[in-house]
Image (spheres, helix red, strand yellow):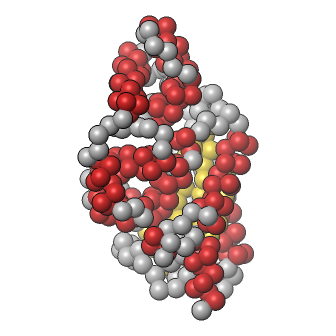
Amino acid sequence: MALNGVRQEHLYCCIQEMHNDGYAIAEICDILDLNRSSYYKWLHRSKSFREVENESLLHDIGLIYAAHNSTYGYRRIADEYNATHEKRYNLKRFYRLAHLVGLLAVIRRKRPAYQRSKPEVTAENILNRDFTAKNTNEKWCTDVTEMKYGSEGEKAYLSAILDLKGRDIVSFAIGKHNNNQLVFDTFDLAVKKYPDAHPLFHSDRGFQYTSQQFKARLDKQKMTQSMSRVGKCIDNGPMEGFWGILKCEMYYLNHFETYEDLVTAVEQFIHYYNTQRRQHRLDCQTPASYRSLLEAA
């Protein structure tokens, strides 16, 4: 994998990873709003010295990680590498590389005091990967993603709702627990913002979305529920695409010492995404300006 610290580089690496998982390049580029020709130009480029150096370092990081039975985090990997190699690198570089490829130390944790519940409500995949919409608030997608902070990899969860016409984040909530309340809060914020919206509401089959309580919320707002097929995350492609953008352009490039640091970074990035990050599919408008133009017409 080639790594050079440029934001676009990280997105191209995400495309590689998703393609390795069986997704078509054209479909991934469309979801991420990236030009296919630019991706192929990057793929066949001549690698810079730093990229080659990063690949070599990443190989050595993997060897150290495996040699210690996946128990070393990036700090101990850095200590081991710098103690046994002539050339030394700073801690931030080890963190970035290890984090990008998902090398996490094994940490002893308490056994969860709950059992996985069976879904109370399921719905057909009505969206059926038709990610187009004629109007704003016609189709919403939602999902929850996990992020980590602190030296021991403590978990936080981000829930968001994306509008398929404007591609704006309608609402989001972040918390330390992946529970019903996180999803309910996200939904309630969206309804408060657009009380007259009755979109097709698409999600995966996570326990929050299959609960009777959540179905009651949808029914109250006269929204039709749609769910991805089991094991088919591409059915919720626009949300997967947004998580890829957020993680590649912000999350993977930073280390968050505290929960508050992570929350602030997420809030700032979503504001940037909605109000400053232009998209080709939106006629080079930002999601916020594109929505405003549509609703003013």
Compared with 228, 132 (above or below) is below
**On screen, residue 171 above or below 102:** below
Q: Is residue 204 visible?
A: no
Q: Residue at x 49, y 48 (%)?
A: 7
Residue 112: image location, x then y, percent: 57, 37
* Rendered view: 172 above or below 254: below
- Of the pair 239 and 50, the residue shown nearer to us: 50
- Residue at image coords 52%, 85%: 135
Side of 240 where 155 appears, left or right? right
Q: At which x and y percent is residue 155? A: 60, 40
Q: Where is residue 35 shown, x and y percent of the image? A: 36, 62
Q: Residue at x 56, y 60 (%)?
A: 208
Residue at 49% x, 68% y is 279
- Number of numbered markers: 0
Can I make out residue 48 in this image? yes
Residue 104 image offset from top left, x and y in percent: 49, 30
**In this view, 11 is above or below 124:** above
Quarter of the figure with the C terminus? bottom right
Drawn side of residue 144 relative to residue 150, left or right: left
Q: Quadrant of residue 296?
A: bottom right
> Among all residues in the image, which is located at the extreme bottom?
297
Q: Dividing the picture into quarters, in which one does residue 195 lie?
A: bottom right
**In front of the other: 64 or 161:** 64
Viewport quadrant of the N terminus: top left
